Image (cartoon, grey):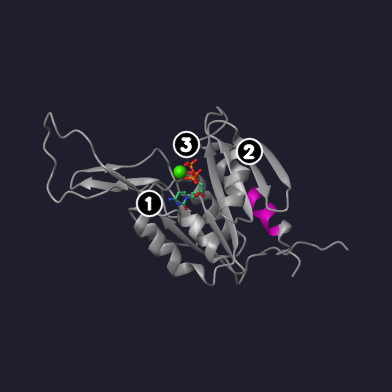
Amino acid sequence: AHFEPKNLPLKGKKVVVTAGPTRERIDPVRYISNFSSGKMGYSMAEAAASLGAETILISGPVSLDKPAGVKVVNVESAADMFEAVRAEYEDATIVIKSAAVADYRPAEIHTQKIKKSDDDSVIELARTTDILQTLGEWKEDQILVGFAAETENVIENGKGKLQRKNLDFIIVNDVTDPGGGFGSDTNVVTLISENGTYHPYSSMPKKELATVLLQAIVQEEGLDTN
Ligand code: CTP
Ligand code: CA
């Protein structure tokens, strides 16, 4: 049977998107972070809202304007982001983890600014919680979408993360591709589903790509037909 997609397939549904980097404090004036601009995540949130979803955007520190029709929750560290996502998880239809979460944080946060010295040049690190992996362990009916930023073996590494984190979809991204990546307004990705389908997309603006990706997810999940 052929179904006409409805205009607003995500109306009445909640979509949670994370975006941007996290910042892991070292002392009152320093932190560990990464080059994520947040553009892909903000575009995903904008696309979700334009498909009718109640959209919650949990954002690390970025310099982007709030997308129209989206509720923004600002966070700083991986631990903050985990708390914010957890609070929105249970009744979410789709969770999209675009954020570039720091994998490590300083083992302790110094309360005073660290002074330079010759014998104290090592910062001890501890692993952050893998938010997406934890969501995968807790998954009930939620559709879980991850991102994977890779520099080599892009598809294999992405598929490994899809399986390891119990995801429904992963959007893999070769960050060395000149057609996209960190900071760029364009991106080149492949959408891989847990059912084994592959959708490779050529370089396009992140805003346009976000809509295409979300529509593909909506279609594969049959959200446009019920
Ligand atoms: N992620 C997360 N929490 C973390 C680390 C990653 O939720 N502490 C999520 C990211 O938001 C992304 C996905 O996991 O959706 C993949 O992130 P990525 O950095 O590519 O993978 P890692 O599992 O961290 O593995 P590695 O960095 O070693 O490649
Ligand atoms: Ca990582």
Cα distance, mark 3 to mark 2?
Answer: 21 Å
In the image, the segment drawn in magenta is 211-218
Left/right of residue 79 with respect to residue 158 in the rendered view? left
Residue 137 % position (x, y): 54, 62
Badge 1 density bin: few <14, some 14–19, many ≥20, Cα 10 Å: some
Q: Is residue 210 above or below residue 85?
A: above
Q: Secondary structure at mark 3?
A: loop
- Residue that numbered label 3 is attached to: 182
Identified by mark 1, the residue type is Thr
- Residue that numbered label 1 is attached to: 128
Q: Is residue 161 magenta?
A: no
Q: Secondary structure at mark 2?
A: helix
Q: Earlier in the sequence, mark 3 or mark 1?
A: 1
Q: Is mark 1 within 8 Å of ligand 1?
A: yes
Residue 132 % position (x, y): 50, 55
Q: Which label is found at residue 156?
A: 2
Q: Are marks 3 and 2 in contact (CB under 8 Å)?
A: no
Q: Earlier in the sequence, mark 1 or mark 2?
A: 1
Q: Earlier in the sequence, mark 3 or mark 2?
A: 2
Single out the mark in the foreground, 3 or 1: 1
- Residue occupying image coordinates x 14% and y 41%: 114
Identified by mark 3, the residue type is Phe
Cα distance, mark 1 to mark 2?
Answer: 24 Å
Image quadrant of ligand 2 equals: top left
Locate the C terminus by quadrant. Answer: bottom right
Locate the N terminus by quadrant. Answer: bottom right
Residue 181 % position (x, y): 51, 35
Q: Main secondary structure of the magenta part?
A: helix
Badge 2 density bin: few <14, some 14–19, many ≥20, Cα 10 Å: few
- Residue occupying image coordinates x 73% and y 53%: 195
